[in-house]
Image: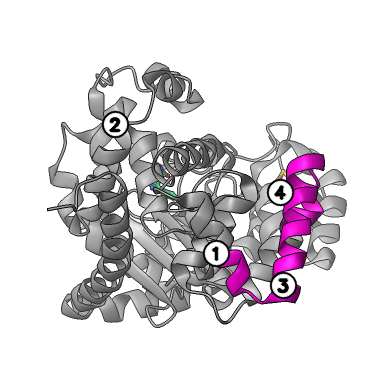
Amino acid sequence: MSTVDSQQRVLSGMRPTGRLHLGHLHGVLKNWVKLQHEYECFFFVADWHALTTDYGDPGIFEENVVEMVIDWLAVGVNPGSAALFVQSKVPEHAELHLLLSMITPIGWLERVPSYKDQQEKLREKDLDTYGFLGYPLLQAADILIYRAGYVPVGADQVAHVELTREVARRFNHMYGREPGFEENAMAAVRKMGKKSARLYSSLRTAYQEQGDHEALAKAQALLKEQQNISIGDRERLFGYLEGGGKMILYEPQALLTPACKMPGLDGQKMSKSYGNTITLREPLKDVEKKISTMPTDPARVRRKDPGDPEKCPVWQLHLSYSSQKTRDWVVAGCKSAGIGCLECKKPVIEAVIAELEPIQKEAAQYERDPDIVRSIIAEGCETARECAKATIQEVRSAMGLNTW
Ligand code: TRP
Ligand code: SF4
């Protein structure tokens, strides 16, 4: 598939750090399930990424990889619509990472905000390593190897997608200049036929001379419609539009996943490291117990003390799970001390259980038959490799490595 079609391709990865929880479900997975119907999707277990911070604890991956994919499948990520695979099983990611490392200035990596942030946050780990510094470039390779057009990520990862774009641009600029690029591009223009060629040239001029971005978008759309030019020519013409060379690596866009409002049991963000999660496979009895013992507005010491939902983490759960009618009942009942906290929690408990029950049924089937999961992963890896191989071939050639 050419870079042009791949604009409709979505790629995202997740580290295998343990059982997924409601935060992942509402923050990431529901979005994946939606995207898989709209785009060609590649979702992968980022086990190499996990090693960049957890290299001291490699045992945790073995089990987590399959278990995480079980969670994906159980919530409705569909291997018929999306390739599900494991990063370390597609070594092309590593080769591209290596090759990109040749042209990536160290300063670009040191400036990525997560570099210093994470070093500060994870002080107990020694993150003064080469692998940790290079981790955003590994992520760039993950994305570029599939020529993905869109990358669903949270706000903390947007800088990584931006780095990916810069690296792709630099690569195309350095290696997209095949000998005779201008002549080849001009010959390709002629192949489009008179009318399209004239339109392309005038849009290109409008973009290059006046910075007219609408003209650029129109010209790109025009190229996508062309039936009678080769993939190579199309890539040339894409590159020629923006002034660089042939476009070998495609600049992706971040699809910002809206920040998830799912609170943990203590009102902070739900996260394994805070120990405030409800996992997707939490026994339903424990779901009930965990929510029943959640702290509430501290002002409600006794049943007759009125409270304020705004000061209560349970209210955050109502915002995710309850209808307007239930919410009105909560607000009125809380402020007037008309309802007790346990009573207030009941609809939330019911809603969470109703959400998790079918997920757990699905998960149980896969748990009984992990071989099915393994074969889903194997198939996903194969699909991914096929795509990755095509890119790495072009990259090798562009860098002069396929010449003998
Ligand atoms: N870095 C991401 C994280 O830590 C995971 C990740 C790795 C990823 N490669 C990716 C996400 C490529 C999107 C695209 O959560
Ligand atoms: Fe929180 Fe509900 Fe209790 Fe009010 S009544 S403090 S919203 S649990």
Viewed as shown, does residue 119 lie left or right of 355?
left
Q: Is residue 55 left or right of residue 355?
A: left
The image's colouring method is one colour
Q: Secondary structure at mark 2?
A: loop
- The residue closer to the viewer here, 53 or 193, is 193
Q: Which residue is mark 3?
A: 196
- Tell whether label 2 touches label 1 (CB within 8 Å): no
Give x and y (percent) for residue 69.
31, 65
Residue labelled with disc 4: 315
The residue labelled by disc 2 is: 102
Answer yes or no: do the residues labelled 4 and 3 have beta carbons within 8 Å?
no
First in sequence: mark 2 vs mark 3? 2
N-terminal-most mark, 4 or 2: 2
Residue at (18% x, 46% y) in the render? 60
Local crowd size for mark 3, using a 10 Å CA cut-off: few (<14), some (14–19), many (≥20): some
Say the numbered circle drawn on residue 303. Answer: none
Residue segment shown in magenta: 188-216
321 is within the stretch colored magenta: no
> Is the residue marked 3 within 8 Å of ligand 1, measured from its CB?
no
Q: Is residue 250 above or below residue 167?
A: below
Query: Residue 350's quadrant in the figure?
Result: bottom right
